[in-house]
Image (tube, rainbow, N blue to C red):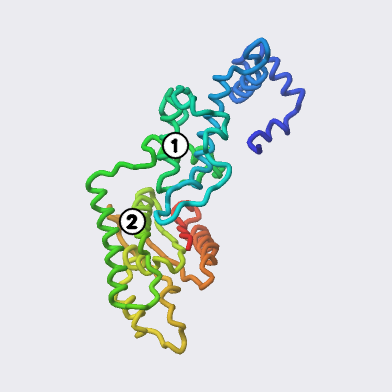
Amino acid sequence: MDKFSYIGNGDVNAIEELYKNYQKDPESVDFGWKKFFEGFDFSRADFEDNGKIPQNVQKEFMVIELIHDYRSRGHLFTKTNPVRTRRTYSPTLDIENYGLEASDLETEFNAGSEIGLGKAKLSTIIAHLQETYCSSIGIEYTYIRKPEVVKWIQEKIEPNRNQPNFEPEEKQRLFKRICQAVEFEGFLHKKFVGQKRFSLEGGESLVPSIYYAIERGVDLGIKEFVVGMAHRGRLNTLTNIFGKPVEDIFNEFDGKDYDEKGFDGDVKYHLGWTSNRKTDSGLKVYMNIAPNPSHLEAVGPVVQGIARAKQEKYHPKNIENVLPIIIHG
């Protein structure tokens, strides 16, 4: 409700005077107040002689509420685990929880315009929402307090049902990055049998995700990246994103570079790395992955601090030049 705080803090008499002016001439008041008073009048309107809102209008609002809940809670019902059924969260997104019935599924609702479908059957609206928000990728974003960011995300995922279309060349680049990640894990598994390696198996898509975040970020003007992540997939990221020589990682597995008396054997998962490289478009980028402790998530605020320090010292006039990336362990 903080977005309406300006009303609570306003002078009641002044607002009343504005409303009187609006009643005489709606164009005489500021656009924002005009819209506010339009909503105020709408809320007071009688839709029928008995003062009740027609059922079809009520159900339009119910469908809008359903759409909102898919956007805010759909990630809780995604199909992200092929092994076992996800636990049930309450309340569910069943239409009965919104005052809708099975008989409404073939009814067309104007609320479909909210997700770009125009007037559409309820069954079509639900299928669209299920594919967008409850498939194998969950998106949690409605907590963001910047409306323009929320709108940007919706425009990216709702028209294509959260299934982006890639050009053949892009698909080849993605496939190459995933193959590199898979081959790296497979080699470590065969070469260093029984050793801890905190594999990225099953999550190899992390590598192309970071790769494209960096590529796109540099195209938008970012000069430095600071990354914080835990053990899982760290070696793969160091090799395939930061360009750390595989020879160095193999030596760490063999224990050639560290005295076993001074280290506990998993030092390779704590080490940081810094690199300069060129993107596919030929632009230079400076990248740093921060060392992390055994208390894995502790690296998160450290990365934020590193990024803030870089912004203030090296990029005070354009803090957007530095982007921290924190990956949950």
Label 1 secondary element: helix
Please tell me in which quadrant of the rendered image residue 24 appears: top right
Is 235 in front, or is 115?
A: 115
In the rendering, at what x and y percent does residue 328 appear?
48, 60
2 and 1 marks in contact (CB < 8 Å):
no
Q: Amino acid at mark 2?
A: Pro
Decide which of 185, 66 is in the foreground and name it: 66
Q: Earlier in the sequence, mark 2 or mark 1?
A: 1
Q: Residue at x 66, y 38 (%)?
A: 2
Residue for point 44% across, 36% down: 129
Q: In the drawing, does residue 305 fall left or right of residue 229?
A: right
Q: Position of residue 211 (x, y in %)?
A: 34, 57
| Image mark for residue 208 | 2
Look at the image and tell me in which quarter the N terminus lies.
top right
- Please tell me how crowded label 1 is: few (under 14), some (14-19), or many (20+) other residues with Cα within 10 Å: many
Residue furthest bottom as drawn? 261
The percent coordinates of residue 153 (x first, y second) are: 45, 41
Q: Is residue 220 above or below residue 248?
A: above
